[in-house]
Structure formats: structure tokens, C-alpha cells
Amino acid sequence: MKNFLLVTAAIVLFLPSVHGQGFEYDSKTDLGHGLHKVKSGDFYGIIDDNDNVIVSVEFQDILFREGKALLIKGDVIEGIVDSLGNSKLFDIKYKAHPKFRYIYDGHIIIGNDEKWGFLTADGVPLYVEESKIKSFFSLGKKHPTMFDVVFPFVEGYAAVYTDRSGWLHIDKAGAKRFVLEDKKMKALFRSSVYKGECIIVTDEGIKQYQETGEMQAVVKRVLSSSITNANYMLDALPARLIYNEGILTMDSLMRVSKYESNSDSIVFIEKPRKTVVKKAVIVPLDTLSIKEDLDVQLIYKNLQANGRGKAYTEIKLQNTSNEKIENLSVSLECAGAEREWEGTIDALSEHKLSFNIPARFSSASITRKIQVVIRYKDETVEHTLPVTIKRYNPIRSR
């Protein structure tokens, strides 16, 4: 009886201390409006200032764009959530695209059996009538039209591909846009639209196009009058099309940012330049440059693989300027693992990104390189961060 009382007293004394410590998440990111994105293990959710769960902590990373984010579980899109914590679950579940996992121009890229289509942010499918575009897969108006390859909607247009028809541009009503004069000509590639213009590759070469009021594509500039020895690297970071005549480099939205040939180099998406004003009374609205004002550091360079075949590290983003960096986009890639983050870093502050690297190998250690691509407005900066990973050595009991 005496021992029982002692054990009971110890439990009573222990309980308040456990309650006082509270539950700690692996990470907690302020989303504004009294909301916070939290991480527990490999799962993410949203809580409020009072630790009330707003979005269940059971989803893959919740990445906001245009004030909304996809709720993805097991690579399946369950629904969306906005920046105020309002969520909407979809009746029909579709696969999330491995590369385009945001909401783009009010539309979501969804998949089914290696085919890809679009939903609006409200879950309405984009259906294309067969009279407008042939050679696609469709189950009717209640389901989205599916293509072999799709790029995100940008400026109201999206580039799509089918094996039979080649590349096309469509608008949000499903109509063909940037229609080539030769109806029989099959486009071999189309970029996303930037400032009302795009790049189209055909057997007649690489050309920059504008659109007429009749939705016809007209040539603005000939980059090359031929193409030979094509090498498509659309899944690379950054994506590229390599020909003997020149190289097209794309940004994260698959817009052509640069064309390089042996004799010329054309930049389509300019990086912002700092404005130097002497004895001026007007201060430039934006003098931020992520190349000069954002310091990127690898916190852990020497890593230890764990039993799950992964190695954990963190990348620190340090804003050294006196201005807030808003709508910053960061992409991480290493050994097939990818992570994307968008957010804001206040002046003279920092943000840390956790990253798990695949680490299964037989040697004592291995060197990996983390590719970091940072985008701010029209500026893009790339970093290569090497890490050394030691092989996992389980402790065996005797």
C-alpha cells in the first residue's frame, strides 16, 4: 500500500510538468492573420495563435501562391486552403503534378494515369470541346480534358501537348491561341507566355511570336531558321532545350528567359537593375537585389545518414537589407529530392529551410550538391552547396 501511494504521488507531480512543456512542432512558420504553418515529422498543417488546428497536420508541404495552397496527401490533391484558413475539399481526387504544385493564374494542374489537365481553384474542370482541339483524352464535361504534357497558366494561356497534335496554346475557355498560319504545321515546342509573347519551335526553326486580334500567331523575331540534334531537358533545373543552333533556357513557369547561340545571346526576362540616383529627391521604389541582399548559407555541411536512408540539413536565407523581401520563391534539388518554398523575409532577418537528402550508398561517405534556385520578381540567382554525407551505421546490440 505504501509503495502504491508513492507511485501515485510521483505521477501527480509529473503530470503538471508535462502539460507545462506543451507539444513542440518540428517547425512553425507565421502565415499572417493569426495563422501558422506547422510541421510534425513529414506532415504539415495549420494552427492559430491559440494552438487550435485549422488544417489537419497530415498533408505534404503547404505551399501558398496567389493567396491559396494545395492540400496534398500521398501525392493526391485533397483540396485547397486560402491565407485566411478557409479550406475546400474536392469531391474527385486527382494526382498532383510532381513539378507544378501551386495554383497558377487561378488554375491547378491535376493528373490521372499519366495524363494532365486543369481545375480552377474552385475545383471546376477545364473541359475542351473536341471541335476546338482534337486528339485529347476526355470523359465529358464533368471531368477535365487530359493532355500528355501541360505547363501552368500564365497571363491567361497554357501550353499543352499531345503526341498526335504536338504543342498548342489554349486559353481559360479551352480555345486554341497563337494559331500558326500553316494549319498542318506541328509545333515541336511552345513556351509559356511572357508579356503577350512566346517562343514556338517548328521544323522551320525557333521563332518569337505575338498574337493578332484573330488569335493568329505572327513572327516577331527569328532566332534560328533551322533546328538539329534536339535535346529536351524539361525536367532539369532550370529547364532547357538544346539544339546545335542554340539553347533555350526556361524559368519556373516555363517562360523562355534566355536564348544563347554561338554568335548571340538574347535575354527575354531581364533581371532588375539597381537605380543609382545622385542628389535626387525621389527614392527608387525597389532597389532590392537577391544577388547582393540575400545571403544563402548551408547550416550543416557534414551530415549523417539515418536509418530511413535520408540525411537532414538546413539552408539559411539571410536578408541583409533594410527592406522586406516579399513573394520570394526558393527551389531546392539534390539527388532527386525537391522542395519549393514561397514567402516573405523581413528586413535584417533570416528564414531556415529544412531539407532531407536521399542517402543510400555503400561507401563510407559521399559528396552531394544541393542546387538552390532563388527567384524574386524577374531576378533569378542559383547556388550550388556541397555536402558530405556519412553512411548510416546501425548500432547492433550484443
Image (tube, helix red, strand yellow):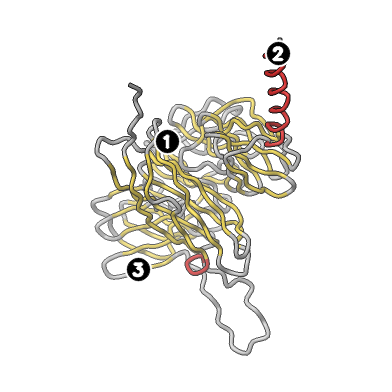
Name the residue nearer the viewer: 387 or 7.
7
Earlier sequence position, callout 3 versus callout 1:
1
Q: Position of residue 47 (x, y in %)?
A: 69, 38
Name the residue nearer the viewer: 169 or 246.
246
Q: Which residue is mark 1?
A: 148
Circle 1: element type: loop
Residue at image coords 45%, 53%: 299
Name the residue nearer the viewer: 109 or 342.
342
What's the distance in space between the residues labelled 3 and 2, CA to CA? Answer: 87 Å
Earlier sequence position, callout 3 versus callout 2:
2
Considering the image in quadrants, where does the C terminus appear? top left
Circle 3: element type: strand
Are the residues tagged 1 and 2 within 8 Å (C-beta)?
Answer: no
Q: Position of residue 183 (x, y in %)?
A: 41, 47
Q: Which residue is mark 2?
A: 2
Circle 2: element type: helix
Are the residues tagged 3 and 1 within 8 Å (C-beta)?
Answer: no
Residue at image coords 24%, 57%: 244
Q: Nearer the viewer, mark 3 or mark 1?
A: 3
Please indicate, yes or no, whether residue 130 appears anywhere in the rendered image.
Answer: no
Name the residue nearer the viewer: 193 or 250.
250
Mark 3 surroundings: few (<14), some (14-19) or many (≥20) residues within 10 A = few
* Residue 73 sits above or below residue 61 on the image: above
* Residue 267 sits above or below residue 15 on the image: below
Tag 2: residue type? Answer: Lys
Q: Is residue 254 left or right of residue 154?
A: left
Q: Is residue 298 left or right of residue 80?
A: left
Q: Is residue 18 left or right of residue 393?
A: right
Tag 1: residue type? Answer: Asp
* Residue 139 sits above or below residue 119 on the image: above
**Disc sitting over residue 265 in the figure:** 3
What's the distance in space between the residues labelled 3 and 1, CA to CA? Answer: 32 Å
